[in-house]
Image (cartoon, rainbow, N blue to C red):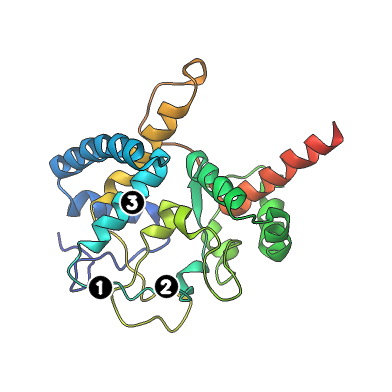
Amino acid sequence: MALPTDHNGMFIQGMTDSEELQKFLTLKFPQGEVQETYDRRLDEVKTVSKQDSKTPLRAFWKMVDRSFDQKSEPLQCQEGCGHCCYTAVAATQLEWDGILNNARENDIDLNQVIERSTRTISKVRKVLDQGKDLEQVDWHRLVINQPCPFLNDDQSCMVYEDRPLDCRMVVAYRDACTSKNLEHAQRAVVVDEAVGPTVIARLQHEQTPKIKRRKFTGSQKVRLLHHWLILWQEKNKKKKRR
């Protein structure tokens, strides 16, 4: 079966179809390589987290960055190039906690973030009020061509160091992008995309108090960044009413 790739071996179809991407990853990376990388990354996380006094997730992000740095061709992505930031981005609880920590460290006002993204957040809120979730809605089309809530006016990311895996795995090795349609963006460049979701799920599982842990399934629930912001806002409103 021929893989839908460009000359660099990167996934160039189904940018918004997670099932198609997963099929591609399964075909591209042998199961043995995936398992070996998964085990090695977990060991590395513990070492780097302790040595550098980083959170386990930030330690893993360091490894992902290293994987891209080891690619032979340089990334075209540069600060101020935000063409890939006009689509739906999902994150786990652990990734969202990392973003919240970043916001605290850098004095980012999440209320202002919500206000700047009122249009798309209102769309997401309306769908959520109908009781629908990620499995029932094409969230990508719901917010396509609208900036990520954390995209600055200068097209830089407010929380770049802690951006979720969804963002890190959309890259460009071709010439600079000229539109927001993701035609220059590519995925499945490194094996970390195949192991990343499971590594993050394991880190989240291990940080969950044992009394609240359920059996590890290899995955964790994800929500749109817009959804996380809505939940954050609702939680803060409840605190103020007490």
Precedes in sequence: disc 2 or disc 3: 3
Horizontally, is 32 left or right of 215 in the view?
left
Secondary structure of the residue carrying tag 1 is: loop
Give amino acid for label 2. Leu
Residue at horizontal 49 percent and vertical 48 percent from the top: 91
Q: Which numbered mark, 1 or 3, is in the foreground of this view? A: 3
Give the x, y percent position of residue 11.
27, 64
* Alpha carbons under labels 2 and 3: distance apart: 25 Å
* Alpha carbons under labels 1 and 2: distance apart: 18 Å
Precedes in sequence: disc 1 or disc 2: 1
Q: Which numbered mark, 1 or 2, is in the foreground of this view? A: 1
Task: Report which residue position mark 1 lands on.
Answer: 74
Q: Which numbered mark, 2 or 3, is in the foreground of this view? A: 3
Is residue 130 visible from the viewing direction of this image? Answer: no
Secondary structure of the residue carrying tag 3 is: helix
Give amino acid for label 1. Pro
Q: How many marks?
A: 3
Task: Report which residue position mark 3 lands on.
Answer: 62
Q: Is residue 124 above or below residue 35?
A: below
Give the x, y percent position of residue 199.
33, 39
Residue at horizontal 51 percent and vertical 15 percent from the top: 211
Q: How crowded is mark 3: few (under 14 residues within 10 Å), some or many (20 or more)?
A: some
Q: Which of 21 and 224 is in front in this view?
A: 224
Residue at horizontal 69 percent and vertical 56 percent from the top: 109
Toward which corner of the image does residue 235 lie, by quadrant? top right
Task: Report which residue position mark 2 lands on.
Answer: 182
Residue at horizontal 57 percent and vertical 64 percent from the top: 148
Q: In this view, does 129 lie above or below 151?
A: above
Give the x, y percent position of residue 74.
25, 73
Give amino acid for label 3. Lys
